[in-house]
Amino acid sequence: MKGFGDLYKYEKKKNKKAEFSKKELFNKAIEFHKRGKIQEATKYYQEIISQGCNNPIVFTNYGSILENIGKLNEAEIFHRKAIELNPNYAIAHSNLGNVLKDLGNLKNAEFSFRKAIELDPNFANAHSNLGNILRDFGNLKDAEICHRKAIKLNPNYAIAHCNLGNALKDLGKLKDAELSFRKAIELNPNLIFAHSNLGIILKDIDKLEEAEISTRKAIELFPDFANAHLNLGNIFRDKGKLEDAELSYRKAIEINPDYVEAYSNLAIILRDIDKLEEARICVDKIMCIRPWSILGSFSFNYLIKSD
């Protein structure tokens, strides 16, 4: 979860006309950013920066936009610039942590989140972000503690409830995880990952009808959510609806042509409905994408048993 810098109050009174112009540009950038008008916000952030800017909020907000469009290396530069301008700006440290996590630099991401918390112990976003890193490290108990701290600081923080559900799921606490995902959805009915993850939990506890409803809701909210299509295929497989499962796996692959797990699950379904040549094509595709894939070897061995 990214932090967001808000309206900035200039203290300096020099060159009032120029400062007022920058304030107008800044406030327009913030207004458009809050409304989700990213193209317009980007234009104003870039204009402020081109005029010469020492406002850390501008740099970290613009860095967050760059992160959202996949320009991670550029985003890192802008968040670091914000920190250079204000080393005590907790939001910038947390935003930098998000970028470093996406870049796979987990240790430095952890350091950034811990620094944000050191600067602002009541920064709920940073606590939950740290929890996600600790989960990635397999430190699930501490991850749970971090997410619960975030929720204590902000009980209406839907993403923290969703993140807590993920940690609880990994800990094998499926009922508690279900409750966390349901709470996240109660707080934010449009939280895609909460619906999808709830569907996974419901499938795992054999509530297949409810699992299908939750997963379909995730797809309704985000039709190109490949993982949700994969999960829907898994639900159909468990319900014995193999043709529907096949369609769901193919949709996941259509969205993400390099989705190894979808090819593996599709290969098994195709084998079970006697489409062996198509199944072998799936296995070959897995080995092309990921030659060292355990899933590819598993699918291959599964196919051999049919011969």
Image (cartoon, helix red, strand yellow):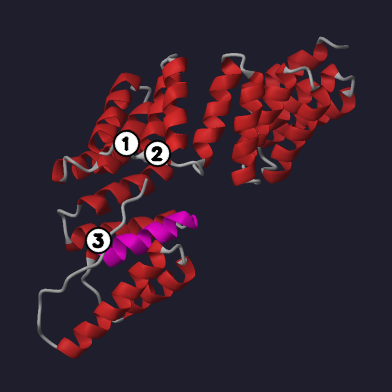
Amino acid at circle 3: Ala
Report which residue position mark 1 lands on. Answer: 128
Report which residue position mark 2 lands on. Answer: 159
Q: Would residue 200 appear left or right of 160 to someone viewing this image? A: right
Report which residue position mark 3 lands on. Answer: 82
Q: Nearer the viewer, residue 225 or 72?
A: 225
Q: Nearer the viewer, residue 68 or 243?
A: 243
Image quadrant occupied by the N terminus: top left
**Whole-number angstrom distance, CA of label 2 to CA of label 3:** 25 Å
Q: Residue at x 20, y 83 (%)?
A: 19
Q: Position of residue 76 (x, y in %)?
A: 35, 55
Closer to the eye: label 1 or 3: 1
Amino acid at circle 1: Ser
Q: In the rendered structure, which disc, 1 or 2, sits on the residue that comes first in sequence? A: 1
**Whole-number angstrom distance, CA of label 1 to CA of label 2:** 8 Å
- Residue 103 visible in the displayed image: no
Q: Position of residue 170 (x, y in %)?
A: 44, 20
Image quadrant occupied by the C terminus: top right
Q: Position of residue 84 (x, y in %)?
A: 20, 60
Helix, strand or loop for disc 2: helix
Closer to the eye: label 2 or 3: 2
Q: Is mark 2 in CB contact (under 8 Å) with mark 3?
A: no
